[in-house]
Amino acid sequence: MTVVKEFPRPAADLVAAFRGQSPATLHEAMGKKGAMSFPIKPLYQGMTLFGTAVTVSGGPTDNLMIHAAMALTRPGDVLVVDFKGMTEAGPWGDVLTEAAIQRGVAGLVIDGCVRDAAAIRNMGFPVFCRGTSMKGTTKTQPTGDVNTPIVCGGVMVMPGDIVVGDDDGVVVVPQAEAAATLAKAAERERMEEGLREQLRAGRTTVEALKLEPCLEAGGIAL
């Protein structure tokens, strides 16, 4: 078991710049990297999150290490939990949600399930997970790690990485790539707005995206 209490964090203004960013755009800006696997989705539609990753490895039937990680969080952190894809237990519920809110935690991403879903929605706390399970867990097994590299939803996550989520899912931006990714995302958004302007002017997506050569290579002429 390893518990790292301190780790390098990105500057607050850099993290704040990810507010409202599209995970899909960030994924594209990083060369189609960083997107967690399909099952990791918001507990309810409309949930969004962004913040600095505090990583947890634990489970699959005990949530003691989540409690340990919670005690080390700072306002704006996102708990990212590798719970081994377990779907027959809910290691997170309304009590941990209340604790997270009181500590200013920005959200939870867990490769596993949660419970007390209606209460979490009413509390307005962003949760991204595989689904729900009413089955509880124990709190007796000090096995796992806090703030070490983990894999969650098929993506490597380091403590201090920036995590962004919306209805499309979750993307992880490595801390070292954060500033460059923001710049590339802004460039992509400008490019896509240019495409939309062409569509409003009557061009087809084939014309705007210059897809004619690909179609012609397959013997298709429009």
Image: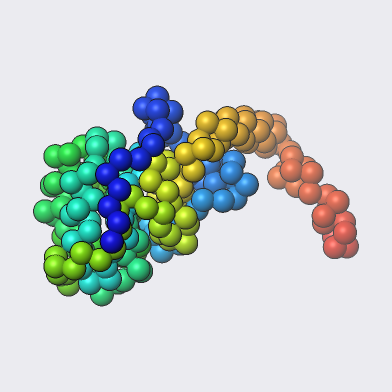
Residue 40 on image: x %, y %: 39, 59
According to the image, what is the colour scheme of the structure? rainbow
Write the residue at 47% across / 57% down: 155
How many numbered circles does the render carry?
0
> Measuring 27% from the left and 52% from the top, which residue is drawn there?
3
Q: Position of residue 147 (x, y in %)?
A: 33, 50
| Nearer to us in this view, 139 or 18 | 139
Is residue 58 in view? Answer: yes
Whether residue 130 is situated above or below residue 108 in the rendered picture: below
* Residue closest to the eye, 97 or 221: 97
Q: In front: 56, or 168? A: 56
Residue 169 shows in the view? no
At x 74%, y 40%, the residue is: 208
Q: Is residue 163 left or right of residue 54?
A: right
Q: Residue furthest top?
A: 13
Left or right side of 116 for 143: right
Horizontal side, residue 157 vs residue 131: left or right:
right
In the rendered image, which quarter is residue 67 located in?
A: bottom left
Image point (35%, 69%), residue name: 85
